[in-house]
Image (cartoon, rainbow, N blue to C red):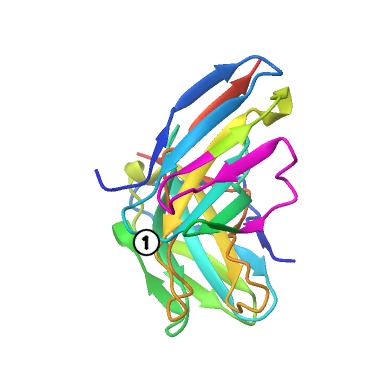
């Protein structure tokens, strides 16, 4: 079974400061990892993904994430937070192996990011 | 707008009634997914189609739930004899995948919020 843990329900950061939203995962074999953002009453918006290759992945709106296989983590980061980054962030995982034929994403419970002006 | 669209955006129904939701994926996306999201939780996978074939179903998809994608384009999700526990946001996503492109991104629609009274 695959799972995702987002240990912080909420992260508070001042505008202009760096931010980190944590994610750890469990999956059989190599993972495909994703970050999505959700604004109130909206669907999920794709930010970035790790499939293979460079462990540092750059995505939309200045976000980046680092894949760490030994720690089974995929933390989301941004060097300088904006008030407009305030939203709900979800990490998701899927096994890369198609032996099981599964394509479903397993999501974490989400982390609310609050950026204070 | 060329994104995933879902209708209706909101649905209020009485317990025991049937409801049907529609999802129109991004044009030419061959894969379509349904997820359910309850308050304070991440999305949970329900079912997945590749073209018109329903290839994967979650244990969450009880006998009261049925999904179709008859022509490999739009999809419908029907809930029969609704229960209060069915109240949730129902999200649809689509992707363009192939054997050579298994880590493709799932793009989400805005969701249909269901309230069962």
Up the image or down, A101 lies above or below A111; here it is: below
- Asked if one can make out residue B13 in the rendered structure from this viewpoint, the answer is yes
- What is the chain identity of the residue bearing mark 1? A
Identity of the residue drawn at 60% across and 40% down: B37
Up the image or down, B15 lies above or below A13; here it is: above
- Picture quadrant of residue B40: top right
Whole-percent x, y for residue A66 in the image = 48, 73
Which residues, given as a range, are shown in magenta? B55-76
SS label for mark 1: loop
Between A66 and B93, the one lying in front of the other is B93
Whole-percent x, y for residue A36 in the image = 46, 54
| Residue wearing tag 1 | A63
Up the image or down, A81 lies above or below B30; here it is: above
Identity of the residue drawn at 51% across and 39% down: B76
Which residue in the rendered view is the most extreme toward the left? Answer: B1
Q: Is residue B70 magenta?
A: yes
User: Pointer 1: residues within 10 angstroms few (<14), some, or many (20+)?
Assistant: many
Q: Is residue B1 left or right of residue A58?
A: left
Q: Is residue B53 left or right of residue A99?
A: left
Whole-percent x, y for residue A39 in the image = 42, 39
Number of numbered markers: 1
């Amino acid at each position: 079974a695959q799972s995702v843990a987002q240990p912080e329900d909420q992260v508070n950061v001042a505008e202009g400061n760096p931010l980190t939203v944590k994610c750890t995962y469990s999956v059989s074999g190599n993972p495909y990892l994703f970050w999505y953002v959700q604004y109130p009453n909206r669907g999920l918006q794709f930010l970035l993904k790790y499939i293979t290759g460079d462990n540092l992945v750059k995505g939309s709106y200045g976000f980046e994430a680092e894949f760490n296989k030994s720690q089974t983590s995929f933390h989301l980061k941004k060097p300088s937070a904006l008030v407009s980054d305030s939203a709900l962030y979800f990490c998701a995982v899927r096994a890369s192996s198609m032996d099981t034929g599964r394509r479903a994403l397993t999501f974490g419970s989400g982390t609310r990011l609050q950026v204070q002006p | 707008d060329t994104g995933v669209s879902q209708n209706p955006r909101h649905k209020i129904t009485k317990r025991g009634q049937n409801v049907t939701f529609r999802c129109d994926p991004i044009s030419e996306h061959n894969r379509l997914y349904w997820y359910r999201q309850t308050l304070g939780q991440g999305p949970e996978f329900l079912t997945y189609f590749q073209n018109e074939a329903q290839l994967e179903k979650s244990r969450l998809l009880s006998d009261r739930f049925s999904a179709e994608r008859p022509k490999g384009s739009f999809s419908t999700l029907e809930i029969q004899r609704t229960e209060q526990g069915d109240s949730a946001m129902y999200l649809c996503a689509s992707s363009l995948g192939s054997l050579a492109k298994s880590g493709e991104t799932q793009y989400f629609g805005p969701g249909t919020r269901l309230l069962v009274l």
